[in-house]
Each structure stands twice: as C-alpha cells, then as structure tokens.
Amino acid sequence: MIKRESKKSTKTMLTLILIGVLSTGFTAAVEALNTGAAYTVSLWHLDEVLPDGYREVTPDAIGQNPGILVATPKAPLLVEGKFNKAMSFDGNNGVYVPIRFLVGFPPSPQPIYIPISTSLDIQKEIKIEAWINVQDFKNVTYNNIVIKCTRTDASTENVTRIYGIAVKAGLPQNGYAVAAGALSGYVYTDTDGFNEIVTTEPVVPLNEWIHVAFKRDLATGMHLYVNGAEQPVKAIYGTQNPKGKIINGTEVYFGHDAVVTIDEIQISDLAPETQTVTAQVDIGPNLLIAVIAVSVIFAVAWILRRAIQTWMIHSKS
C-alpha cells in the first residue's frame, strides 16, 4: 500500500512540476502579447567598464545587450559625465553591441546569420536618446552617437544603416546643404528604403552637455529633439514619414567616428506588441532546459531506487 502511494505521489509531483513549467512559458508569452505600453529595451549608463574574458564591456542596465569596447588603437575612456561617469570617444574607437553574427559568406552563396540578442530589432516605433558633449566635429558625414547597421559580408564597406542618431560636420549630402552642428536621425524600412532627416539649423554646440533624442512614429513620422524641445527638420533622403517596418540588423555602435563624450544611452520600443514572437521564441530554450532538468532528476532518482532495490535483494540472498 505504501509503495503504491509513493509511486502515485511521485507521478503527481512530476505532473505538477511539468504543468508549472509549461504554465510559466505560456504566461510569459501572453504577457508579452498584451503589453501595450512603451518600454526601455536597453539602457547603457556608460559609467562602468568590466573585464569579460579577453575583452572589456560596458553593461546594459536592462541586462540584455552589453557593449564591447572597440580599441582602434585605444579603447574609449571613462571620464566625468553628466551623471557620474561617462564614456569619451576619440573619433576612431567605439562600443559594439552584437545582434547577430554573420557567417557563411563565400564560399556560401548566401549570408547566414546566427542570432545573439535580437531585442534591438525594433520594427515599428522607436526612440533613441542620450546625453552628449561634442568636443569637435570630425570631418565625416556621420559623427555617430548611436547607429544600428547590417552587413552582408565581412567588408566594412558593405554596411547598411538601419536606424540611428548622429551629428553633422557641415558636409553636403544628397544635394542638400547640411550645417555643422546639425542633428540627424534615420531609419531604413522594408517599404521605403533609407530615410534621413536633419535639423534645419545647427543645434549641437561644442563642449556643452545637451540631451538629444530621435523618434520614429508610425502616424507622424520621424522627429528630433534637443533638451526636450522638438526641432524643425527636413528630409535629405527619402521622406520624413516613411512607411513599412524597420529592417533587422547585425550590430549597434556607439560613438563611432565622433569626438564626443556620451552618457545615458537609452533605446525604447514604442510599439512593444511587435516583439511578441521574439518573446515566445526566447522562452523556448528556458522551457526546454527546465523540462530536461526535471527529466534528468527523475531519471537519476529512478536509477538510484532500482540500485537500492537490487542491493537489498542481494543482501537478503
């Protein structure tokens, strides 16, 4: 009688544990589906550098997308910032955040992408913001604050800008005059291709802390803000209100080609329901690990039970 009840309770316990694990996965997926409010995908305070094996990283406060310091030849430095410490870039170095690794370029006929962390693949509505202190305008088209891009091979020339915010150095673009100190923002969509707006006047002073933001809204288009105030803009590529979804990318960079100190980079998803599928996929490995772990535990328990029974039989004989 006792043995039967023990077997029954063991089966019941296993069933309850599996139901609990499955319920957790299902609940997480449903919550992702029902979340309608904007939320912060990643937040980098840029006030800390940590060793991570052979490299150094600056952590993401959300915990999803740590940034890897790029030394060319020197890594970005921690300096006094707007809030505690910040990160200083010299126009050559940067911070790299992988989204997916590119493999399979020649001899493979098509590139193959291995996902690393796809939460930065925001497809509909996005906001990028940061505190910046620009020391000089580097003589390049984009003094990058934040840039997400994608590549189809290992060449640095074959890179497509996906979304980002940058400072201009005064170089003309696409037949338009662009002032030194103008701010720009852009997205690349699956419908309208590359679209970029710039402020009509210089808005970025040298050696002064300002808060900059870029927002893409499905209804009203792309907008730029300085210290919370929206700025007049013009489109120099595509349109101010592009249609379609922002395409996915392979990586994000901070401070590339910019002589700037950056503090508090924040990227927000303003339409998070678009991430439901990603949330469900991300839950999968955790669920699988939990099920495997439970199965292993009960398999070990069964083997031990059989071993004890065998030992008892041999002891009696």
Image (cartoon, helix red, strand yellow):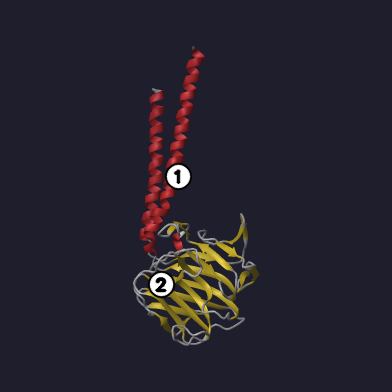
Query: Which residue lies at the image location 58% right of the left edge and 72% below the top edge?
Result: 262
Q: Is residue 265 above or below residue 19?
A: below
Q: Quadrant of residue 269?
A: bottom left
Q: Position of residue 176 (x, y in %)?
A: 45, 86
Against 13, residue 224 (above or below) is below
State which quadrant residue 19 falls in.
top left
Q: Residue furthest top?
A: 317
Disc 1 to disc 2, how far (Cα)?
Answer: 37 Å
Going from N to C along the chain, the mark reached first, 1 or 2, is 2
Q: Nearer the viewer, residue 167 or 289?
A: 167
Residue count near mark 2 (Cα–Cα under 10 Å), binned few <14, some 14–19, many ≥20: many
Mark 1 = which residue?
289
Q: Between tags 1 and 2, which lies in front?
A: 2
Name the spot of residue 235 as percent of width and height, x first: 41, 82
Q: Residue at x 45, y 61 (%)?
A: 119
Q: Is residue 265 left or right of residue 192?
A: right
**Amino acid of disc 1:** Ile
Q: Residue at x 46, y 87 (%)?
A: 200
Residue at figure coordinates x 39%, y 27% from the top left:
5
- Element under disc 1: helix
Q: Is residue 92 left or right of residue 21?
A: right
Residue designated by label 2 = 188
Dot 1, how many residues are within 10 Å of its Cα: few (below 14), some (14-19), or many (20+)?
few
What kind of residue is marked 2?
Answer: Tyr
Residue 144 at x, y percent in the picture: 53, 74
Nearer to us in this view, 212 or 143? 143
